[in-house]
Image (cartoon, rainbow, N blue to C red):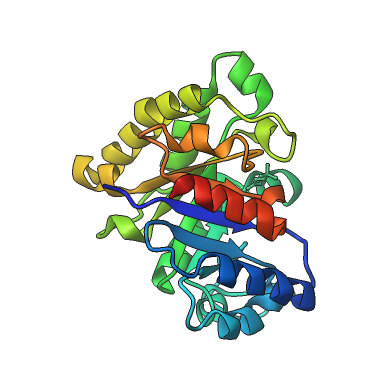
Amino acid sequence: MRKPLIAGNWKMNKTESEGISLVRKLIQGVKSLTTVDVLICPPFTSLSQLNKLLVSSPILLGAQNISEHKSGAFTGEISADMAAEFCTHVILGHSERRAFYGETDELINLKVTAALNAGMIPVLCVGEQLEERESGGAASVIAGQLQAGLEGVHLPDPDLMVIAYEPVWAIGSGLSASAEDTGDLIGGVIRPTLSGLWGEIISQKIRILYGGSVNPGNARGFFTQSEIDGALVGGASLSADNFLGIIEQAT
Ligand code: PGA
């Protein structure tokens, strides 16, 4: 029912020329792909060139962040309208932005609204810290991040939102969550929270990804869970072989 989405978060990696050479390989690798959507999120500096390179490819392009402001005196920031010239999606609420740049749920909520107003699809990341999981608090942390991050957001169409569940302790650590636990958490916490916001029909149609140390070897386990609709991939999206290997597991 929900088409899988495999998204690559390049983080602060790849110069423009390195990005072009990676994307050339991806374009070849996904040529005849129709059953899976593929999204890459490179640094801002590569978006313009990669947008041109991808013009006749099914690969979608996303940003990794936007400003909550529309325009003006905000040195160093990129607005949603600027990113939307090149991108269909934007990653918001990533745990690295929450941890290193102090992004709160309230700020993320403003960015979600800014993205939607500019016609971009947010990939909203939520996830618990290790201590929160160990103390049994994961469900309430995740539900709280969703409720606050999405407060007041009108969503007429489920295709306009993607959620990525990324347990913070699994990101870049080589320790992935168990596929069964993840499926249970999405089915038992994330989808019901979305249903509370936008109703059952919309919540059943929104794509919910897993992220955290996904690689070609463990991806299949996640994709066999009916509640998991794809992956947000960090480290393994920087190599064409690894990223294409994960995409293959989703087909
Ligand atoms: P990782 O990163 O795949 O390197 O764990 C995932 C992410 O941060 O989105």
- Of residues 116 and 239, which is closer to you in this image? 239
Q: How many dots with numbers? A: 0
Ligand 1's quadrant = top right
Residue 48 in which image quadrant: bottom right
Can residue 106 be seen by looking at this rendering? no
Residue in front for this viewpoint, 32 or 226:
32
Residue at (22%, 42%) from the top-left corner?
199
Residue 126 is situated, as x and y percent measured from the top left of the image, at 53, 40
Q: Is 65 placed above or below 203 here?
A: below
Q: Is residue 207 above or below residue 40?
A: above
Residue at 59% from the left image edge and 83% from the top image edge: 53
Relative to residue 161, is residue 179 depicted above or below?
Answer: above
Residue 190 in percent (x, y) is at 40, 34
Is 69 left or right of 113, judged from the image as shown? right
User: Can the viewer see residue 220?
Assistant: yes
In the displayed structure image, the side of residue 68 where residue 234 appears, left or right:
right
In the image, what residue occupies the spot 72% across and 43% down?
A: 99
Question: Toward the viewer: 92 or 43?
Answer: 43
Q: Residue at x 51, y 37 (%)?
A: 220
Q: Where is residue 221 in the image (x, y as percent from the top left)?
A: 51, 31
Q: How far across and down, in percent of the image, does residue 144 sit?
A: 47, 34
Residue reaching furthest to the top: 135
